[in-house]
Amino acid sequence: RNWKTITIGVISYLLALAFFVGGGGKLAAMEPFPTSFANWGIPLWFMFFTGAVEVTLAALLLFRQTRFSGALLGEATMIGALLIHIVAAEWSALVAPIVFLTLFGLVAWTTRLSWFPLIGRQTKQGASA
């Protein structure tokens, strides 16, 4: 293994930890999540849905074969978080989603070739699925 593989693995594990904790907090309806969703005018069921998405993407990040999918799901989730904070004019809350979006993008970019065999495209080695 080279340093890039190890670095992306460490970043993926740290993202997974963060989203297991955050998603688990939403699924357990721990504060401040119910209050935040209520303040944004978002139904409580969407908090539970978001928590399930976050726990799912965290699990996907743990394995090299599914890391790309987890990173894409994380990017979509962070775009949603950014939109919510912009609409709510919570400017200081934009920092975390931007950092996470950047890290998910890095993981997705560096693991994108792992997904190509699943969709029938050729990898750099020329092997087709």
Image (spheres, rainbow, N blue to C red):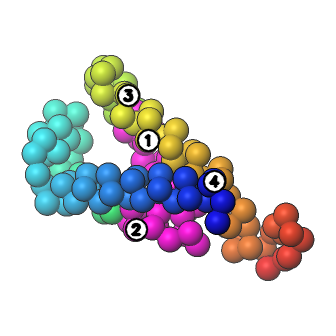
Residue 52 in the figure: left or right of residue 9 = left
Give the secondary structure at mark 4. Answer: helix
Do tag 3 and tag 1 residues touch (Cβ < 8 Å)? no
Q: Quadrant of the N terminus?
A: bottom right
Which of these two is toward me, 8 or 40?
A: 8
Do tag 2 and tag 1 residues touch (Cβ < 8 Å)? no
Residue drawn 21% across the image and 47% down it: 43
Q: Quadrant of residue 23?
A: bottom left
Q: What x and y, as percent, mark residue 50?
A: 31, 54
Kindly report which numbered mark, 2 or 4, lies closer to the viewer in this rendering: 4
Kindly report which numbered mark, 4 or 3, lies closer to the viewer in this rendering: 4
Residue drawn 33% across the image and 57% down it: 17
Label 4 and label 1: CA atoms lie apart by 19 Å
Read off the magenta span: 56-82
Do tag 3 and tag 2 residues touch (Cβ < 8 Å)? no
Do tag 2 and tag 4 residues touch (Cβ < 8 Å)? no
Residue 117 in the figure: left or right of residue 8 = right
Residue farthest bottom in this picture: 129
Badge 3 or badge 2: first in the primary sequence: 2
Label 4 and label 3: CA atoms lie apart by 25 Å
Q: Which mark is residue 100?
A: 1
Q: Which mark is residue 59?
A: 2
Residue drawn 13% across the image and 41% down it: 32
Q: Amino acid at mark 1?
A: Phe
Does residue 63 sit above or below 41 in this rendering? Answer: below
Residue 103 in the figure: left or right of residue 46 = right
